[in-house]
């Protein structure tokens, strides 16, 4: 019996049915949204803090890798247990407690983000981070990846709403960072070090989230432009007017064309296949009414066409183009490499020109959409999985894209993180000194290197690993 097998058997004796070595359970925990699959030795579902401590202490004693798992929607392979070992599944940790006076929510790590939205909105509060995977992903995973979403430009991302964290160091000790108060200035801020650390520096079991009042009014406007550079230029003039839309969602002409072909309808009659920007204002009724006038004047001057929603039902109709484009893209290829780069506003037009060059040189369709208030664009490099040459061209295109965004002053990831898939590009973004400092932090907190090993710093040649050919619940949505 190997050391890992002995350690697993011992853990099973201690935790009983909360340790599963069943083939199907291990397979389900072997991959995430990236579909990169590595079988763990066991799936462990601890019930309380002392069981987590026991799991981590045993892992340290026997050198067993531990990968914490929320809902497994990560798109980078960060939740795939690349070195095997134990998957620490916190998906059953779902308790929530709202403080409706202070405007905070205490929440366990496995709570689903859409459930958080429903709970707080029913009481007139708003938790803005809204990843497109919100119906599936957990708050623990959002904290570990510093998840964003459409509201990032105006309100911020997960990090901006976490007041306190509870959980475990990789050695197993229980710790609390912050106290749930809105101000806290005591000691090093390890709370923020954990946020975005992709489960490599600790296990989050509970968080206190900051809430803001739910906006009383919303207003939606759909606009179209002659081409992508025109859309980018126009959005800059809008921001120069000090307008802060709650949502500013861009779809390039390739994304719009996919949605139009899928539905058989044009977004703007007589304007088929033009890039669009969806704007949403949010705030008090008077704030929204006042800003609406400014935005309409801007739209008359800078767009080719626009439609405003007079009520929520009309807003839903305008949103349908955005909802349909993601699934419709699969007419261009059965697979995509979905990147989440960030481009600074000053480089928008140069980035649009670069993407056209990348489309030509890679000979691949690259529909792009995303959040123009913060420059976080989803570049979707489409390919056919049965065509290996296409796949290699897609991977090469990703690498070129990453170099280009760093050259333009941007970021290789705005919300998905590094995981396995982006390890080749970490040195594009960070200097050797920066990477050494990050590794030193990892070693200080996790001297045995048991928590989510093989991620972020070690080169993972993603093109050498086949992805599972399975359909996940969120695929094509
Ligand atoms: C269709 C789709 C759309 C998406 N849209 C967005 C989007 O708009 N914005 C965005 O930011 N992301 C998006 N994502 C990516 C993904 O949903 C996020 O990264 C999310 O934060 C992952 O949460 P999860 O619960 O699934 O975490 P998992 O996939 O289970 O884990 C992700 C990482 O977090 C770690 N982790 C999980 N729980 C804990 C914990 N309790 N303590 C410590 N570490 C932990 C894991 O070890 C792993 O490294 C999308 C994914 C899909 C499939």
Image (cartoon, grey):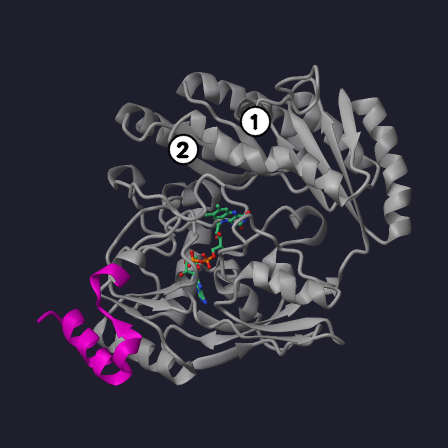
- Mark seen at residue 263: 1
> In which quadrant will I find the N terminus?
bottom left
Report x, y in % for residue 353.
58, 21
Q: Is residue 440 above or below residue 153?
A: below
Q: How many numbered circles are shown?
A: 2
Q: Position of residue 61 (x, y in %)?
A: 24, 78
Q: Where on the picture, by quarter, is residue 333?
A: top left
Q: Is residue 80 above or below residue 306?
A: below
Q: SS for tag 1?
A: helix
Asked whether residue 252 appears in the rendered view, the answer is yes
Pick the residue in front: 108 or 339: 108
Please tell me how crowded label 2 is: few (under 14), some (14-19), or many (20+) other residues with Cα within 10 Å. some
Bounds of the magenta segment: 1-25
- Side (left or right) of 239 relative to 194: right
Instruction: Please tell me which residue is depicted at 41% across the width and 41% down the height of the picture.
Output: 425
Q: Secondary structure at mark 2?
A: helix
Kindly identify which residue carries mark 2.
399
Q: Quadrant of residue 247?
A: top right
Q: Nearer the viewer, residue 238 or 120?
A: 120
- Which residue is located at x 55 percent, y 32 percent? 325
Image x and y of residue 33, in percent: 40, 48
Above or below, 448 relative to 320: below
**Depth check, front residue: 262 or 420:** 262
Image coords of residue 264 (percent x, y)? 57, 22
Residue at screen point 61% across, 19% down: 273
Q: Is residue 78 above or below residue 7?
A: above
């Amino acid at each position: 019996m190997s050391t890992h097998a002995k350690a697993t058997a011992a853990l099973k004796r201690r935790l009983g049915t909360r340790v599963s070595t069943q083939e199907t359970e291990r397979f389900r925990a072997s991959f995430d949204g990236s579909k990169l699959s590595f079988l763990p030795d066991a799936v462990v579902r601890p019930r309380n803090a002392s069981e987590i401590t026991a799991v981590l202490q045993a892992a340290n004693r026997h050198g067993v890798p531990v990968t914490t798992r929320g809902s497994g929607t990560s798109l980078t392979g960060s939740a795939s247990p690349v070195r095997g070992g134990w998957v620490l599944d916190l998906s059953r940790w779902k308790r929530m407690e709202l403080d409706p006076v202070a405007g905070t929510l205490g929440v366990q790590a496995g709570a689903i983000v859409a459930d958080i939205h429903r709970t707080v909105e029913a009481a007139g509060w708003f938790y803005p981070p809204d990843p497109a995977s919100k119906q599936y992903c957990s708050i623990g995973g959002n904290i570990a990846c510093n998840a964003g979403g459409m509201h990032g430009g105006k309100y911020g991302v997960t990090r901006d709403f976490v007041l306190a964290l509870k959980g475990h160091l990789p050695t197993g000790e229980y710790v609390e960072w912050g106290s749930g108060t809105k101000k806290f200035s005591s000691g090093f801020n390890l709370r923020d070090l954990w946020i975005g650390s992709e489960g490599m520096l600790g296990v989050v079991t509970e968080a206190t989230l900051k809430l803001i009042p739910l906006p009383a009014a919303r207003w939606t406007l759909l606009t179209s432009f002659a081409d992508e550079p025109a859309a980018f230029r126009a959005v800059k003039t809008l921001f120069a007017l000090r307008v802060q839309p709650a949502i500013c969602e861009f779809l390039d002409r390739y994304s719009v064309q996919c949605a139009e072909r899928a539905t058989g309808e044009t977004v703007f009659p007589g304007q088929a296949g033009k890039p669009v920007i969806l704007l949403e204002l949010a705030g008090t009724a008077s704030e929204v009414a006042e800003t609406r006038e400014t935005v309409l004047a801007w739209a008359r001057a800078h767009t080719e066409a626009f439609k405003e929603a007079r009520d929520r039902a009309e807003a839903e109709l305008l949103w349908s183009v955005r909802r349909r484009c993601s699934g419709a893209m699969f007419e261009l290829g059965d697979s995509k490499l979905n990147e989440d780069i960030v481009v600074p506003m000053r480089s928008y037009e140069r980035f649009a020109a670069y993407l056209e060059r990348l489309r030509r040189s890679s000979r691949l369709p690259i529909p792009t959409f995303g959040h123009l208030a913060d420059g976080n664009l989803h570049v979707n490099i489409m390919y056919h999985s049965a065509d290996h040459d296409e796949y290699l061209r897609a991977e090469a295109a990703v690498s070129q894209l990453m170099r280009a965004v760093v050259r333009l002053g941007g970021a290789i990831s705005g919300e998905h993180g590094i995981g396995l898939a982006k390890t080749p590009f970490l040195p594009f973004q960070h200097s050797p000194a920066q990477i050494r400092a990050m590794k030193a932090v990892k070693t200080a907190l996790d001297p045995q290197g048991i928590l989510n090993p093989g991620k972020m710093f070690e080169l993972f040649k993603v093109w050498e690993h086949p992805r599972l050919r399975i359909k996940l619940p969120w695929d094509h949505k």
